[in-house]
Image: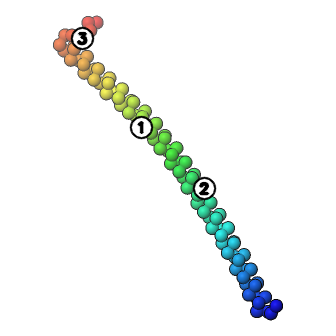
Amino acid sequence: MSSTQFNAGENHGQTQKKTEEWIDSAKGTAQSAHDKTCDALGRTQEQAHRSQDESAGFLQQTGEKVANMAQGAVDGVKNTLGMGEKK
């Protein structure tokens, strides 16, 4: 085997090794990006659930306040017309 053929074979081996290193590095980077994306998605979903629960609680309280105000208005009208409860 001549020196040129040996050098060509050695260069091919080094190139193949470098290519495999790059592929492994790209796989690691892709896996890291995937993991970070999944973590961010999980946090976003948790926040959405918390916000939904808070909104439901707010709407429940608002509904109760409106109902109480309406009942107060009805009682006020009844008392004005003399139809309210006699105490």
Q: How dense is the environment of label 1, judged by Cα within 10 Å: few (below 14), some, or many (20 and up)? A: few
Q: How dense is the environment of label 3, judged by Cα within 10 Å: few (below 14), some, or many (20 and up)? A: few
Q: At which x and y percent is residue 41?
A: 53, 51
Q: Amino acid at mark 1?
A: Ser
- The quadrant of the image that shows the N terminus is bottom right
Q: At which x and y percent is residue 66?
A: 31, 27
Q: At which x and y percent is residue 36?
A: 58, 56
Residue 55 sits above or below residue 32 on the image: above
Residue 8 or 21: which is nearer the viewer? 8
Answer with the quarter of the image where residue 15 lies: bottom right
Circle 1 is placed at which residue position?
Answer: 55
Circle 3 is placed at which residue position?
Answer: 84
Circle 2 is placed at which residue position?
Answer: 35
Residue 71 sits above or below residue 16 on the image: above
Q: CA distance from mark 3 to mark 1?
A: 36 Å
- The quadrant of the image that shows the C terminus is top left
Q: CA distance from mark 1 to mark 2?
A: 30 Å
- Residue at figure coordinates x 24%, y 11% from the top left: 84
- Dot 1: element: helix
Find the residue positioned furthest to the top: 87
Q: How dense is the environment of label 2, judged by Cα within 10 Å: few (below 14), some, or many (20 and up)? A: few
Q: Nearer the viewer, mark 2 or mark 3?
A: 2
Sequence-earlier tag: 2 or 3: 2
In the displayed structure image, the side of residue 22 where residue 83 appears, left or right: left
- Dot 2: element: helix
Q: At which x and y percent is residue 70?
A: 28, 23
**Dots 3, 1 in contact, CB < 8 A:** no
Q: Amino acid at mark 3?
A: Gly
Q: Amino acid at mark 2?
A: Asp
